[in-house]
Amino acid sequence: MLINKLVILIMALLISACGYHLRGALELPQGMKNVYLEGGSAQLREQFKRAMETSSMQLSNSPENAGIIVKIFDEDSRRRVLSLSSGGVANDFELSYRFEYELLDSKNKVLMPRQPIEIKREYYNDQVQVIAKGNEEAVIRDEMYQQAVRSIVNRARVALEESPK
């Protein structure tokens, strides 16, 4: 029994030493330990909240308590038909998600001026498996929101490293 516990402890230490982290966990700079998100759709807010929780961080309830403020502007999500079958049924769709954001510090000083993020995905619309395709679109949209959050965090990391202390 003692050997089993010792093996588990050694494995845990080895895994943590190699830089392993949970999937979806983001390496956040110190300035992003407490983030306030202003604006944005419920889906984007949910993905941001998940990313923060996975990374052991939190979303602030007010800008006064935040280390960094992320302002979202002009959020737009669209679905466009790319091709039609001979019967006039849509074969391919393009999903696009676009918004602009700005990063501010806790004193409302601009760390990064308005920047656009645009993400596009295409998928094939199989008319035989209609229910599965509806679910596929939802999964693709979730992935687009996750990518948007990663983009914001990566750009914020750079902005925080470049800003004077």
Image: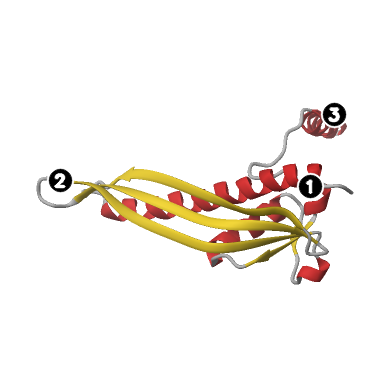
Which comes before the other along the chain, label 1 or label 2?
2
Q: Viewer-nearest of labels 1 and 3? A: 1
Q: Please rate how many residues cluster around mark 3, counting C-alpha atoms within 10 Å: few if below 14, some from 14 to 19, many from 20.
A: few
Amino acid type of the residue tagged 1 in the rendering: Leu
Q: Residue 1 in the image: x percent, y percent?
A: 83, 34
Image point (31%, 53%), residue name: 80
Q: Decide if residue 79 is on the left or right side of residue 98.
A: left
- On the image, numbered disc 2 is attached to which residue? 85
Residue 3, disc: 3
Amino acid type of the residue tagged 2 in the rendering: Ser
Can residue 14 be seen here? The reply is: yes
Q: Please rate how many residues cluster around mark 2, counting C-alpha atoms within 10 Å: few if below 14, some from 14 to 19, many from 20.
A: few
Q: Viewer-nearest of labels 1 and 2? A: 1
Q: Note whether 32 is above or below 26 in the view shown.
A: below
Measure how far apart labels 1 and 3 are at the Cα level: 46 Å
Which comes before the other along the chain, label 1 or label 3?
3
On the image, which quarter does residue 85 sit in?
top left
